[in-house]
Image (spheres, rainbow, N blue to C red):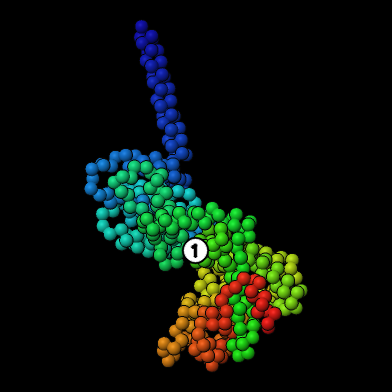
Amino acid sequence: MNGIYISGNIAVLIILSICIYIIISNNKKQNQLFEYAYVDPITKKGNIYYFKKKGQEILGKRKSNEIEFKQYILVLDINKFKMINKTYGYKVGDVILKGIAEELENLLGKESLICRLSNDYFVALFEFKENIHYLLEEMVRHIENLKVGDTVYSLSTNTGVYKLTNEDRNISEILDRAIMAHSASKGEVFEKFHIFDEKIEEELEKESKIEHEMYQALKDREFKVFYQPKFDAKAETLYGAEALVRWEHKGEMIPPSEFIPLFEKNKFILQLDLYIFEQVCSDIKMWKEQLGVEPVISVNISRAHFLEDDFLKKYMLITSKYGINTNKIDFEITESATIEAGINIIEIMRNIKKLGFLISIDDFGTGYSSLSTIQDMPADILKIDKSFVDGIGRSEKNIIDYILTMAKELNLMTIAEGVETKEQRDYLLARGCDIIQGYYYAKPMPKDEFEGYLKQN
């Protein structure tokens, strides 16, 4: 009997051990499946699926009779994070991502729902009862000067924020509103965060409509080149022109201010710039063949091109296609682009000069480049911004005087844009400005009208 009893106990223990093993194994598998499905492997925070699952649960627990909720959702990303990975390696990138997740938790509280949406995008659902602007300013300051261990990483961020209302019950909808606010902040240099409001929604709907139409507009050749003549200040003869883009859509002309900033943000400007450049080269070829003239035409080149390793090859292919002398093309580069982080503008400009193109520093005086930087730039022309021209006559001394003096010291040609009156023109001429551009002489005009100026000159 004892033998049977012992055997029975052993059997029970074996069965019990098997059951425990199965339970532990199942739990382990469930944990593995949960981690695979809901946990971000780098930050160990939740991923997008966990955020939507947990966020929906949080919304479901809210009491509908509360007068006002102090809950917010934010979306944050790091500008040019790909460049960080490319320059310093993915290990450093991962360290930064972990550091951001920890910093968000420190700032927003451990009870907040903080997840990594994708790549360098983070999302957080949190409660904050005080002034949200103070919190966001502190968050930007901490993350843009992210300290991990003994190392400080200088970053650039953009953040969108949405404040939840009593009626909000769908996590996807409130996430979309935070993303809309984030889109409004994208590309901003000084405004690091945007809080969602009706104005942002209207603006983004407008942008969405433009983005829906822009590719077809390019196919349909709706983008037109307008030329604004430039005149020699002394001789008052035609020097050349600036090529400007206009969008003719359904019989209406859309001003550049309504689409260029958007195209800069969504990078469509890369295609548009090349399209406009090809139109310019085609026109120069025609003028040379039919009129025997090759005016100097300046074209705007977006800073987005400078992040493309082969952008100059694309421009050279077009000039070769139409047989254009590169010394008849003036690349206008805005002064702000010369200090863009991650861009070696001096090297880029040297490469441009090697190919024979002219270079203008556009909007000069409105940016933050130092005198030493300007001295090192292989530029040909300084273009004085309209805001300084508008100041002529308002005071005895104008910053234009200093710019013109400096340009002479550096052997740079000067162009003043936005000249509208004889007083402005005479002032600039008396102080040695070389080229005048503005309504005083001519407005931007279609190609056919500009050809009339070419024939006269």
Query: Above or below — where is 193 with respect to 163?
Result: below
Please tell me how crowded label 1 is: few (under 14), some (14-19), or many (20+) other residues with Cα within 10 Å: few
Say which element carries label 1.
Answer: helix
Give x and y (percent) for residue 391.
Answer: 44, 84
Q: Position of residue 423 (x, y in %)?
A: 49, 89
Left or right: where 221 falls relative to 209: right
> Where in the figure is residue 370, as x and y percent of width and height?
50, 80
Q: Quadrant of residue 383?
A: bottom right
Q: Residue at x 76, y 74 (%)?
A: 289
Q: Residue furthest right?
A: 289
The amino acid at mark 1 is Glu
Number of numbered tags placed on the structure image: 1
Q: Nearer the viewer, residue 343 or 311?
A: 311
Q: Residue at x 53, y 55 (%)?
A: 211
Left or right: residue 58 versus residue 412 is left
Residue at x-position 59% and y-position 55%: 215
- Toward the viewer: 256 or 384? 256
Which residue is at 43% across, 25% downward?
22
The percent coordinates of residue 366 (x first, y second) are: 47, 77
- Residue behind mark 1: 258
Residue 155 visible in this rendered orientation of the protein: no
